[in-house]
Image (cartoon, helix red, strand yellow):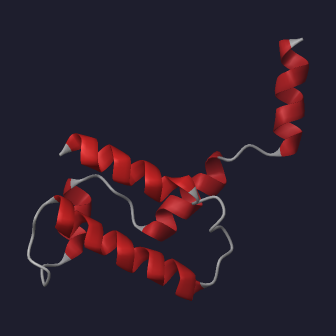
Amino acid sequence: MSVVCSIVGSRLDYCNALLSGAPTATLDKQQCAQNNLPRVVCQSQGRNDARPLLHSLHWLPVKQRVLRARVRRPSPANNKRRRATRQ
């Protein structure tokens, strides 16, 4: 199950930086897809609440993933400073 979780997690994180500033409707569609994935991974019933499954898999909700991607994304000014300190 850990291999599946890592593959799914990497795919979920792949474009999170692009979703920064996206409309709520777009994030809601992404959240709906993410809510279905733990049910498949954990082989759970379709009517079960996905939040406990997300928590057990250590997956953040989409809005938090997007926010984390935005915070972790380095700015161009920081890149210049890093290059200057390396030289």
Looking at the image, is 23 positioned above or below residue 33?
A: below
Point 69% across, 73% down: residue: 21
Left or right, residue 73 beside residue 53: right
Percent position of residue 51, x then y: 24, 71
Percent position of residue 56, x then y: 19, 55
Looking at the image, is 84 positioned above or below residue 76?
A: above
Residue positioned most to the bottom: 25
Point 36% across, 47% down: residue: 7
Looking at the image, is 86 positioned above or below residue 17?
A: above
Instruction: Using the image as rendered, state which of residue 37 and residue 24 is in the foreground.
Output: 37
Percent position of residue 14, x then y: 54, 53
Marker count (numbered): 0
Instruction: Examine the image and state in which quarter residue 40 appears.
Output: bottom left
Left or right, residue 5 beside residue 68: left
Left or right, residue 10 beside residue 56: right
Left or right, residue 58 beside residue 21: left
Point 28% across, 66% down: residue: 37
Q: Quadrant of the C terminus?
A: top right
Residue positioned most to the top: 87
Percent position of residue 30, x then y: 46, 75
Instruction: Using the image as rendered, state which of residue 18 and residue 67 is in the foreground.
Output: 18
Instruction: Examine the image and state in which quarter residue 16 appears.
Output: bottom right
Point 18% across, 69% down: residue: 39
